[in-house]
Image (spheres, grey):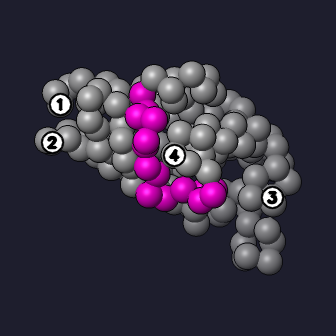
Amino acid sequence: MSEESKAVTRRLIEELFNTGNQEIADEVLATDYVDHSPSHPDLSGPENLKRAVGEWRVAFPDTHNVIEDIVAEGDKVAVRWTTHATHLGEFMGIAATGKRIAVTSFGIFRLSGGKIVESWDTFNVVEMMQQLGVTSLSDM
């Protein structure tokens, strides 16, 4: 199951974010998927993630995620990945800068029945803001 779980998680991180094809979310996420770090808490799991991917890709349309480490044990997969992208649209109130970013993310994904049912993930916001030239919260 470990290799299959890693493959499903890899599809989420690489295919969904790299292409923006939201059908991938339906293929890899359970209908009752729970995102423990939602960017929009009033939307349920799959819909929240689809919205987040859509918003991200408006701001960073050339996103390319590269998985650096992936480890599976039991029903969980742990991943460290780097997002490479160019800031070409508004994001978090910051107008497009045209700057390239390389941001580190970490996540733990729990799978059941071949689908992701829960996730806990985060990215290095400070690293990203520094690369975008944001020096303080008042710049946002």
Magenta segment: 28-42
Figure quadrant of residue 66: top left
Q: Quadrant of the N terminus?
A: top left
SS of the residue under disc 4 = helix
Q: Eyeballing the image, is 40 above or below 69?
A: below
Nearer to me, 46 or 12: 46
Q: Mark 3 points at which residue?
A: 94
Residue 11 pos. (x, y %): 42, 26
Q: Which of the two marks, 3 or 1, is nearer to us in this view? A: 1
Figure quadrant of residue 16: top right
- Residue 12 appearing in the image: yes
Q: In this view, does 9 lie to the left or right of 138?
A: left
Q: Name the residue under label 1.
A: 2
Instruction: Give the amino acid at mark 1.
Output: Ser
Instruction: Give the amino acid at mark 3.
Output: Ile
SS of the residue under disc 3 = loop
Q: Which of the two marks, 3 or 2, is nearer to us in this view? A: 2
Alpha carbon separation for disc pair 4 and 3: 26 Å
Alpha carbon separation for disc pair 4 and 1: 23 Å
Alpha carbon separation for disc pair 3 and 1: 39 Å
Q: Mark 2 points at which residue?
A: 73
Label 4: few (<14), some (14–19) or many (≥20) C-alpha neighbours in 10 Å: many
SS of the residue under disc 2 = strand
